[in-house]
Image (cartoon, rainbow, N blue to C red):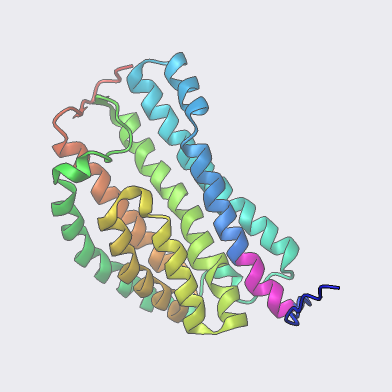
Amino acid sequence: MLFINTQTVDFSWGNQTIQSFFPILLAASAFITYWFIAQSSRIKNFYYSKYTFDQASYRHIIFTKAIGFIVMGILPLVLSLIVLKPFPKHGYGFKLIPETSLFSLIWIIGLCILVIPLVYFSAKKAKNLVNYPQIRSKYWNKKMFYMNAFGWFIYLFGYELLFRGILLFPLVDSLGVWPAIAINIALYSATHIPKGLDETIGALPLGLVLCILTLYSGTIWIAFFVHVAMAWANSFTALKHHPDIHYTRNNRK
């Protein structure tokens, strides 16, 4: 008779295990779900078959931003509150902490002063204009301009709530600071792979800085507002310099 030896593995569950296992699985699942909805050719074809090119591109991208807010922000928060119980002291980073508000404000202003000029100059490059602005409408009006800004705002709130909140704080409690940061940076940089090598590599040091500042402040607000500033600077600089996309005050359809 053939005997196969195996190693003894402890598959038992405990609160600490769930607190590390669930956020990692949730973060990966949430981003994968968002990504395949956003990239769905069926959904994209629905918009492009129903509207003109300019309106289809605008409506499709705003839809993906709203989906990102729900799938990566609202749903993971609800599931975390159900599975991890009860509402944690850190509030997954989106509560206000008066004691660290000045710290957060200083870092938000300082990082914005640093990164916005860098984003501005890189956003004008031809390789960036291939992907940005994400709305590829040839003619933008005021409504598109403001809805694009709002879309990035809600999308990045969901994004930062997931990565710098739900993924980071519970793992720090269960695994410790540096393992939690390493996992966070790995997943965060991986989400940038579809956007190219530059953004993927850039996400490594940026992810490290944002994780550290998030933990020092106890909130996601530094990461969120800096990320929004970068997205707006990139998007609107690309809009200004893209040779085939134009801004008009008229409400073209």
Comparing 131 with 210, the one in front is 131
Q: Dividing the picture into quarters, in which one does residue 101 lie? A: bottom left
Comparing 187 with 104, the one in front is 187
Vertical side of 103 occupied by 137: above or below: above
Q: Quadrant of the N terminus?
A: bottom right
Q: Position of residue 215 (x, y in %)?
A: 47, 78
Determine whether 167 is above or below 43 in the image.
below
Seen from this angle, which residue lies furthest right? 1
Residue 20 drawn in magenta: yes
Percent of width and height locating residue 23: 61, 66
* Residue 4, horizontal then vertical, whole percent: 77, 75
Residue 128 seen in the figure:
yes
> Would you say the magenta stretch is mainly helix, strand or loop?
helix
Which quadrant of the figure has residue 25? bottom right
Residue 106 shown left or right of residue 166 in the figure:
left
Residue drawn at point x = 74 percent, y = 61 percent = 82
Residue 121 location (% of width, % of height): 13, 53
**Image point (70%, 72%), residue name:** 18
Inspect the magenta stretch and tell me whether residue 235 lies in it: no
Residue under the point 42% across and 55% down: 191
User: Relative to the observer, which residue lies in front, 225 or 207?
Assistant: 207
In the picture, measured across the screen, residue 91 lies left or right of residue 45, that is right
Q: Which residue is found at the position 33% from the left and 33% from the top?
A: 135
Instruction: Residue at the far front: name it.
Output: 1
Residue 28 or residue 249, whichever sits in front: 28
Q: Is residue 73 above or below residue 164?
A: above
Magenta part of the chain: 15-23
Q: Is residue 7 left or right of residue 251?
A: right
Picture quarter with the C terminus: top left
- Total number of numbered discs in the rendering: 0
Residue 95 visible in this rendered orientation of the protein: no
